Image: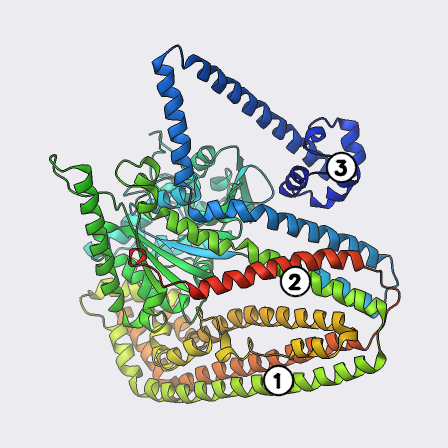
Amino acid sequence: MDDFVREKLTEWGLSEWIERFRVQEIDEENLKDLDNQDIDNLITLVGPRAKFKKRLKLLKGEQNATNQQEHEETADSIQVLATSDTSEKVKRRLELQEESSRMQSPAKKRQRDTTYSEKFMLSEVKNIMTGVHFKLQHRDNTKLNAFLKEKMGDLETEKRELVGVFGKTGSGKSSLINAIIGEKDLLPSGSVTACTTVMIKVEANMKSQKYEAEIQFITKEEWREDLWFLLTFTVNDADRDEQDADDYAAGVEMLSALYGEEWRNNSQENLMNDRHFREIPGFINSNKKTLTCDSAKELSAKLVKYTRSGSTNKEGKEVNRWFWPLVKCVIVRVPNNDFLQHVTLVDLPGSGDRNKSRDKMWKGVIQSCSTVWIVTDINRAAAEKEPWEILESAGSLMGNGGQCQQIHFICTKSDIIEESDDLSLAHVRAAIFKRNMEAKEVVRREFRKLNKVKKHFSDECFKVFTVSSKEFRKKKRLEPDETEVPTLQDFLQNLNDCHSETLNYVSGAHGILSLIQGASCGGVAGEKADASTELEENLRHGLEKVSETIQKALEAFENCLIEGVEKSQSSWERALESFLKPRRTSGSGFHKILKSVVVNNGATKTRKGKQLNLNVKLASWLTDSIDEEFRKTFPNESKCGPFNGAINTFSLNMETLIEKYKDVELQLIYLRTEEERLKTKLDKTIRQRKKEIYSSLTTTIEEIMQTCYDKAKTVTGKGSLQNMKGTIEQHVHANKDTMFEEAKNAMLSKLRILKDDIWSTLVDTMLESIELSLNTDDKSLPDVKEELETVTKYYEELKSTDDASNRNSADQPGPSAAQF
């Protein structure tokens, strides 16, 4: 069996059949000659067999096409002697091939050199573990056996990095995403009027060679609420004035997109009738709709009515129905895309949504993004308000309330510059580079002015890029690297980091096989007891250090929050007045805003897209009081980890013990692996829990304010604006002595629970592992000596590569000025 067959079976998701093909000595040459009977004998399950036949047929078709192309190229070459035109054609083909090679990012070129070998290692180790799991299933069902099978099930971990992409229509956002992932026609470029609130996730299709889109709808009940709000406060409002024109136009656009003209003079109940939604049964049945296509262009055309607004499609034909008002999210899956293997790009609306489920999803995605891209036209980069408002409104969700490590401000259309006819190409290029560097400096200065955002992100977290998707494709004035698209591709490739996935799996497998082999061989009882005693003592000391560090952080938070409560209780009137009596807003205009605030439990969006949130306003002194301490305790970008590195530095001193107790070396190797995996797991748990802890201040305020909002919703008639304001003021005044105190106590309670959970997880997991590793012999376990030798070889090779990479990273100088 050769590497070609292994690679293909792994690529096709059939790695579990590699061993069968190896035994039957199937290589590249005879793979393509397999007939149906051969395949039936090799693959005994119907599903995998059908998949294999389909993939083999495609492979043969690709080979035939390649052979035909080679034949045509040979014929072209023969004709070179006959015609100079053909000579130029061949020359141009070679030039294009060379340019295509140059256009690939350095990361992709490096990946070609290393990915195959690591994919092969991962596939081999997974096959080995599948075989070992099979052996365990046919041995005595002991406690250790069950423990081992459970640990083997935990080896598979899904790695998925989210990159959130903001950018108003016309900023070049879609063109940028298309260029970076190498899909020219995937996301349609927007026009000034074609925009929507639909969130679009773009990720790799790992199960099929098709382009797919999964459309998720809001529920009927949610649309009923949205429809009521549109009809009551937007399009049928008798008190509407000139300031409401934008809201009115947006409401009419949404209703007309979905209903045509039928919404006019029609009741809400009639508009909720299922007959209006016959074309989208997924909405009626609260299901999803899936589109499957052979090309990106075909999928893009089908998606238009679910993601865009407008009256015509890109062919200029009128479209009667647009379903985007009912869509919560669209997941687009692209086949064979290395940049998206472990990365999801999320095309995000600007600042949340009035619809509750869309807004909840929007916030959840923002909190889960490891990187955020802010995309804007280079000519408006510093002056455009929207990008900076997004940063300010979402900064806390991305920073202390999330896990964002980097903000990339991407200035698009960087090749567009005024030029005179008498300027040479060199002068034009020089002008472009000069303008781009000036733009980067201006953007950096603007970022430094954002005091609220700087509480969550340092200057090192903020990078500026000047990008031209057009020049990346056409290369008329700039080389591909000069467009900075390859730099962003490199960034995505590093986020994919297949090496760490492989190392984590192989390391875990190495530990489990070490334990199986060690337990099956027995060992010296005295050494086991001594090692166990010393491990438990080391565990006790390690836990003391962790508890002490976390307790100091809790005390620091309590001191900060006490100060925050005092400021809140002395300043709530000023905060409430600034919210309820905004400047430059008419009474009737603010009436509608305040009504929207109470209907949506304290938060709304203005017609210009700005977020207004009374709960956040009231909690602002509390969040301000802990922001600095929170960022220090739960850093997003620091490698030291949470609680000043208390988890990362936790250690049972395994290396010393391995040297000291050679007779139980294999069991101790497993415990070393388990310790590292446990710390990684705790880091992930803390990263998720800290989001809930940070948001608890605002959440508690919202819960206490809920009765006030419910009461204000019922206020109608003459003087209703003043009555709503009075209702809110009276409620805050009545609760001012307890509301902020309750928010403080809620956060501290969640922090204490987290401390207890960290302690119990460390104790329970490590004590169980020590007990089963060193105080249990199981002669019924299989001998895995050969499997352990193979996996050890792969593990040491991967670890060596990882150590070398870390050394190189430490020696590298800082980023060049061109990156910022």
- Name which residue type carries label 2: Ser
* Disc 3 target residue: 46
The numbered disc on residue 543 is 1
Work out how far the residue at label 3 is from the one at label 2, CA to CA, in angstroms.
33 Å
CB atoms at circles 2 and 1 under 8 Å apart? no
| Vertical arrangement, residue 236 with respect to residue 649, above or below | above
Q: Nearer the viewer, mark 3 or mark 2?
A: 2
- Name which residue type carries label 3: Val
**Image quarter for residue 606?**
bottom left
Q: Secondary structure at mark 2?
A: helix
**Residue 240 in sight from this viewpoint:** no
CB atoms at circles 1 and 3 under 8 Å apart? no
* Disc 2 target residue: 507
Q: Nearer the viewer, mark 1 or mark 3?
A: 1
**Image quarter for residue 479?**
top left
* Crowd class of label 2 (few under 14; some 14 to 19; many from 20; radius 10 Å): many
Q: Earlier in the sequence, mark 2 or mark 1?
A: 2
Left-right relation of 792 to 400: right
Instruction: Depth check: give the residue in front, 134 or 383.
Output: 134
Q: Kindly identify the residue that appears in the image at 16 percent across and 42 percent down.
A: 427
Left-right relation of 712 to 415: right
| Vertical arrangement, residue 617 with respect to residue 242, above or below | below
Measured as percent of width and height from the top left, residue 668 is found at 72, 73
Measured as percent of width and height from the top left, residue 700 is found at 45, 77
Q: Earlier in the sequence, mark 3 or mark 2?
A: 3
Q: Nearer the viewer, mark 2 or mark 1?
A: 2
Measured as percent of width and height from the top left, residue 55 is found at 64, 33
**Image quarter for residue 68?**
top right
| Vertical arrangement, residue 605 with respect to residue 49, above or below | below
Left-right relation of 44 to 362: right
Q: Secondary structure at mark 1?
A: helix
